[in-house]
Amino acid sequence: MRPPFRGLKMLKKILIANRGEIALRVHRACQEMGIRTVAVHSTADASAMHVRLADESVCIGPPAARDSYLNVAAILSAAAITGADAIHPGYGFLSENARFAEMVEAHGLTFIGPTADHIHMMGDKIAAKDAMRKLNVPLVPGSPGALESFEEARAIAETIKYPVLIKAAAGGGGRGMKVARSADELEEAWQVARTEAKAAFGNDAVYMEKYLDRPRHIELQVLADTHGNVVHFGERDCSLQRRHQKLVEEAGSPALNAAQRDALGAQVTAGLRQIGYRNAGTLEFLYQDGQFAFIEMNTRLQVEHPVTEMLCGVDLVREQIRIAAGEKLGYGQADVTFNGHAIECRITAEDPESFAPSPGRVNTYHAPGGLGVRVDSALYSGYAVPPHYDSLVAKLIVHAPSRPQAIARMQRALDEMVVDGIKTTLPLHRRIMADAEFQSGDYTIHWLERFVAREA
Ligand code: MV4
């Protein structure tokens, strides 16, 4: 047993309100800090790795996520009966639910994340942009807030020029967007966006942005403690996505230099200090023609956080827990270093061509290893991937002194890796890494969809 971690709040036992690789990731940080862990699981996950490794586990409901991993009452009860001091929500599920964060604290537990107010603010994309505007973070040209009428929409579109996007205030992550390429497409985009926003989110508030046609998706990782210290850990390039599902992430971005990163980071950390943000956060930007434009902020640990950890040599989950315990970061921006290059491949249980889900039993699982190779996965030989959840089964992360060496290392690691019995996206990742255009680093958010179509 590790020496126990004694933060100001004395976090001795943490309930991990998640499953799969991220539940393991949080468990590992806790283990190294001498903190005991409570796993929660659905009946479909009774033999999952996160349940096996945790110190204690509680079944919180049937397979459907809404009855288990989204079941707030069951999770709070599990925390109460096991005497947990805090809850780590991981990503997805309840991680960006402001009411959940509020209820956790109302029950005398520590929520390992931002305040409910900041989660709520960033969940409303208009409020998030409003906050960033006031903090002088660069934005895409667009409406100053919610569009009040079709006439206002038309007037703004004339000013910022077509094409424009109408986005749902309650959307994000690609949900609830409509493009209008000219004035005669605007009325339909306006109507459809509002109707869909109302149906999907129960909120028909929409806003407008100039449509950027070939951006990169760049995000900045930040940590803030409760003593006013805010630092950033540079950017991740998440442009390689298909239908808003990221496949490959890199840190740093092949398109940026250190001066651009430092300038954006300085602006963002000053802003977050001003609003009293706490814990981990990620600001999403579109980057095109040398300009950054803020689009959304995520108030959770992200799937792709490991590339930042490898680049900067930081344990972001440990930092989240220390911050939640009231500790100071204990270092400043000048102490954060960026070494070499890191790449992550998200390996999912899907057909590598059609992307049809491929749950089922894994016969042989063999993880690659060696210098600079990290595998975050809850897989084991004989494990049955359940059909009820996200298809992510492993994240393969490599770190090397340069981007070309990182690509070579990823190719080597992909060739060593075996996941037999189900279809996975491993073959697709091998093709991406071998592609000359990917290797050149010159890609946008549209590159992967064209690559997949070209290969078909
Ligand atoms: C945009 C855009 C172009 N112009 N906003 C999609 C997800 C959501 N986070 C924001 N998204 C976009 N917003 C303007 N003004 C293009 C996208 C977009 C996208 C962004 C990031 C990563 C992948 C994407 C795929 C399609 C569209």
Image: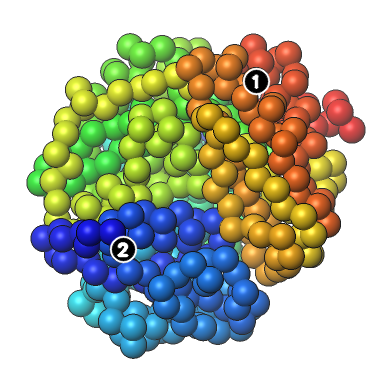
Quarter assignment of residue 140 = top left
Q: Along the horizontal axis of the image, is 234 left or right of 325?
A: right
Residue 138 falls left or right of residue 273: right
In depth, the one of 318 and 265 nearer the eye is 318
Residue at coordinates 70% horizontally, 48% vertically from top-left? Answer: 366
Q: Which residue is mark 2?
A: 1
At 57% across and 22% down in the image, what residue appears? 406
Percent coordinates x, y for residue 321 in the rendering: 27, 55
Q: Where is residue 236? Give x, y as percent.
A: 46, 30
Above or below: residue 29 compared with residue 401? below
Residue 161 is at least partly visible in this image: no
Assign a secondary structure to mark 2.
loop
**Residue reaching furthest to the front:** 1
Q: What residue appears at the point 33 percent right and 37 percent down from the top-left corner?
A: 314
Depth check: give the residue in front, 175 or 84. 84
Measured in 3D between alpha carbons, the distance from the residue under mark 1 to the one under mark 2, in whole angstroms, is 38 Å
The amino acid type, in three-letter code, at marker 1 is Ala
The C terminus: image quadrant: top right
Is residue 336 visible in the rendered structure shown here? Answer: yes
| Sequence-earlier tag: 1 or 2 | 2
Q: What amino acid type should be assigned to the residue bearing mark 2? A: Met
Q: Position of residue 107 (x, y in %)?
A: 24, 80
Image point (81%, 43%), residue name: 352
Colour scheme: rainbow
Figure quadrant of residue 447? top right
Place of residue 305 in the rendered image (x, y in percent of width and height, measured from the top left): 45, 41
Q: Secondary structure at mark 1?
A: helix
**Dot label at residue 408:** 1
Is 248 above or below relative to 433?
A: below
Q: Nearer the viewer, residue 286 or 327?
A: 327
